[in-house]
């Protein structure tokens, strides 16, 4: 059956994210950026000399880390945001197919089935959420030194420092992948993506 001549054309874009998802991502990115930048200034001597005012840098680092979970918690009032969290938290059989293709470096879209979020995005979201909670907990132990014995503070400092380095490396990879995909960035910036991109990169997603 042929479509009617007067039928409206198919939309060239689809809605991917609402305001809650976009603003939670932006606020989290800003706070994470401040955390990483101030951490670098605290641990790299050359950057510490450039920044100066160590007490201010320490305060910015502490409060940006403490506020890091707030955007996600605030966005929970949005039903769409909660639905996306549910999608990120569920792994399906097609995610294993996606991961096997990624390990083989098979970049063909047909070999990487994905819903609204692919398996790589799900793993990243789970890892960064867990790392943030660990960083927050160890950071609090380092901040309130009078509440815990020395051995706890020493262990917290060790975990905090090495996990911070790992977070920096993972974030660099995340930013690099985002820079390589303008359409994904457009989705987080405007909320909409091209239908062709959605059908190619997320064929199991039916917005």
Image (cartoon, rainbow, N blue to C red):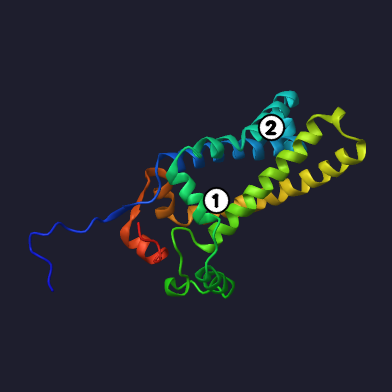
Q: According to the image, label 2 marks what residue?
A: 61
Which residue corresponds to the image point at 77% horizontal and 40% vertical from the top-left? Answer: 138
Which residue corresponds to the image point at 75% horizontal and 26% vertical from the top-left? Answer: 54
Q: Quadrant of residue 103?
A: bottom right
Residues marked 2 and 1 touching at CB (< 8 Å):
no
Which residue corresponds to the image point at 77% horizontal and 43% vertical from the top-left? Answer: 160
Q: From what the image shows, is residue 121 above or below residue 63?
A: below
Residue 117, can we see it?
A: yes
- Mark 1 crowdedness (10 Å alpha carbons): few <14, some 14-19, many ≥20: few
Q: According to the image, label 1 marks what residue?
A: 175
Q: Which quadrant is home to the N terminus?
A: bottom left
Which secondary structure, mark 1? helix
Q: From what the image shows, is residue 5 above or below residue 54?
A: below
**How many numbered circles are shown?**
2
Q: Which quadrant is home to the C terminus?
A: bottom left
Q: Nearer the viewer, residue 43 or 194?
A: 194
């Amino acid at each position: 059956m042929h479509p009617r001549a007067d039928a409206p054309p198919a939309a060239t874009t689809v809605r991917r994210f609402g305001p809650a998802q976009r603003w939670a991502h932006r606020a989290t990115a800003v706070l994470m950026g401040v955390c990483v930048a101030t951490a670098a200034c605290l641990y790299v001597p050359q950057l510490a000399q450039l920044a100066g005012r160590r007490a201010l840098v320490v305060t910015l680092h502490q409060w940006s880390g403490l506020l890091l979970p707030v955007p996600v918690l605030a966005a929970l009032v949005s039903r769409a945001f909660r639905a996306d969290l549910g999608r990120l938290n569920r792994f399906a059989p097609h995610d294993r197919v996606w991961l096997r293709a990624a390990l083989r470096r098979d970049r063909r879209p047909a070999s990487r089935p994905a819903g609204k979020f692919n398996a790589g995005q799900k793993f990243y979201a789970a890892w960064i959420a867990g790392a943030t909670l660990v960083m927050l907990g160890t950071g609090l132990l380092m901040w309130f030194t009078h509440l815990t014995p020395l051995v706890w503070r020493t262990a917290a400092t060790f975990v905090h420092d090495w996990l911070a380095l790992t977070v920096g490396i993972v974030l660099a990879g995340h930013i690099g992948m985002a820079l390589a995909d303008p359409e994904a960035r457009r989705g987080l910036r405007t909320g909409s993506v091209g239908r062709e991109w959605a059908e190619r990169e997320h064929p199991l997603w039916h917005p």
